[in-house]
Image (spheres, grey):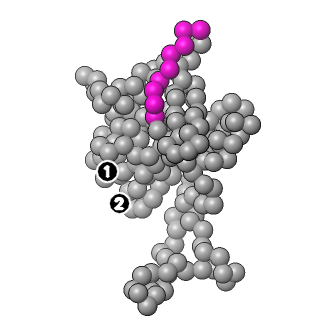
Amino acid sequence: MSDDVQDIDKPAAPAEAPVSEEGVSEPTTSESGAPPEDPTSSYVDVPFRVMHFESVLYDLTDPSPMIYLLEAESPFRYLVVPIALPEAIALQHAHSGIEGRRPATNELVTTILTRLQAEVIAARIVRYDGGVFYSELDLMTPKGREVFDCRTSDAIILALRQKVSAPILCSEEVLQKYYA
């Protein structure tokens, strides 16, 4: 996938949801009786697992540092994601809350998101193909939800750069494929 932004169709204004006797809104359903799909995500029915950033691993015999992510709940699987050295340093700085004298790209993007009142909802690892992890950054903006295709390292760095770290999620399908 490229570093280009995904084109996301804006959902039409939702119809008024029926209200139950308890006053709680019930989800509307389509003619088939199934709940409507969220048009902003192609992963509606895919279960995601919460992952914790554990560390950046440097193996002197390997030219690429690795991001080590650990599943938050049992069975506590892990992912090791290779990244470039500059991203490894940026990730370690994001995790430690270190800011440079001049803003790095991830610090600049974090500042831009904050000023535009956009919040990172989650960094999601959505696909694993040919040894490459594919991710997306899920944002909530004043105009609604936006989902962007991005590198896994960038998604994690931006998630960690939030005032309250955004969750890092991994598709169950990715974990199963990684362990196959």
**Would you call the spot at circle 1 few (<14 residues within 10 Å), some (14-19), or many (20 or more)?**
few
Residue 102 location (% of width, % of height): 28, 24
Establish if 73 lies above or below 40.
above
Residue 113 location (% of width, % of height): 34, 46
Q: How many marks?
A: 2
Q: Tell me the tag on residue 116.
A: 1
Q: Nearer the viewer, residue 34 or 119?
A: 34
Residue interval drawn in magenta: 53-61
Q: Nearer the viewer, residue 15 or 64?
A: 64
* Disc 2: which residue: 142
**Would you call the spot at circle 2 few (<14 residues within 10 Å), some (14-19), or many (20 or more)?**
few
Amino acid type for the residue under numbered disc 2: Pro
Does dot 2 land on a helix, a strand or a loop?
loop
Establish if 179 lies above or below 21.
above
Q: Nearer the viewer, residue 88 or 13?
A: 88
Residue 97 location (% of width, % of height): 30, 30
Q: What's the residue at 47%, 55% (across, down)?
A: 146
Q: Mark 2 or mark 1: name the one nearer the start of the chain.
A: 1
Residue pushed farthest top? 61
Q: What's the residue at 69%, 42% (across, down)?
A: 176
Q: What's the residue at 52%, 78% (across, down)?
A: 27
Residue pushed farthest front? 74
